[in-house]
């Protein structure tokens, strides 16, 4: 979404859905639900923010979103009360952890 807002590029091949531990939960649920509902999954990429952080930043990287926010995005208000708060926090963490991506 940020890419489209900044560049005007709305090509679906540039969409990356990111979830924390998504490869075990959110991505599987999303794809199964789409297929069960007769919806053909779009041509988009999936990313797991936990796997990215552990692989690139190191295996000692915290796993909890609150700990990651404290480390990378102190100014972000985070409460673990739902997907919206998680998404905003993870966006801030990923943008801060990978500034040149």
Image (cartoon, rainbow, N blue to C red):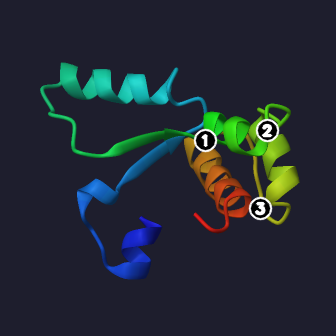
Element type at marker 3? loop
Q: Mark 2 packing: few (<14 Cα in 10 Å), some, or many (20+)? A: few
Say which residue label 3 marks: 76
Residue at 41% across, 64% down:
1
- Of the two numbered discs 2 and 1 on the same chain, state the one appearing first in sequence: 1
Q: How far apart are marks 3 and 2 (CA)?
A: 23 Å
Residue at 25% across, 57% down:
12
Q: Which of 81 and 64 is in front in this view?
A: 64
Answer with left or right where residue 85 lies relative to residue 8: right
- Evaluate if marks 2 and 1 touch, with contact meaning CB atoms under 8 Å apart: no
- Of the two numbered discs 3 and 2 on the same chain, state the one appearing first in sequence: 2
Q: Mark 3 packing: few (<14 Cα in 10 Å), some, or many (20+)? A: some
Say which residue label 2 marks: 58
Q: Distance between the residues labelled 2 and 1?
A: 13 Å
Mark 3 or 2: the one toward you: 2
Say which mark, if any, is on residue 86.
none
Q: Nearer the viewer, residue 99 or 19?
A: 99
Answer with left or right where residue 99 lies relative to residue 48: right
Say which mark, if any, is on residue 49.
1
- Percent of width and height locating residue 18: 50, 44
Give above or below for 49 relative to 11: above
Give above or below for 59 relative to 66: above
Residue at 85% across, 61% down:
74
- Percent of width and height locating residue 10: 27, 68
- Of the two numbered discs 3 and 1 on the same chain, state the one appearing first in sequence: 1
Q: How far apart are marks 3 and 1 (CA)?
A: 17 Å
Mark 2 or 1: the one toward you: 2
- Percent of width and height locating residue 65: 74, 40
Mark 3 or 1: the one toward you: 1
Residue at 72% across, 35% down:
54
């Amino acid at each position: 979404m940020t890419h489209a807002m900044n560049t005007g590029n709305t090509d679906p091949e540039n969409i990356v859905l990111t979830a924390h531990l998504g490869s075990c939960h959110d991505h599987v649920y999303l794809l199964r639900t789409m297929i069960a509902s007769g919806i053909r999954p779009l041509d988009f990429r999936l990313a797991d923010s936990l796997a990215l952080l552990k692989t690139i930043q190191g295996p000692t990287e915290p796993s909890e979103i609150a700990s990651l926010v404290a480390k990378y995005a102190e100014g972000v208000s985070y409460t673990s009360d739902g997907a919206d708060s998680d998404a905003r926090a993870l966006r801030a963490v990923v943008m801060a952890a990978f500034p040149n991506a």
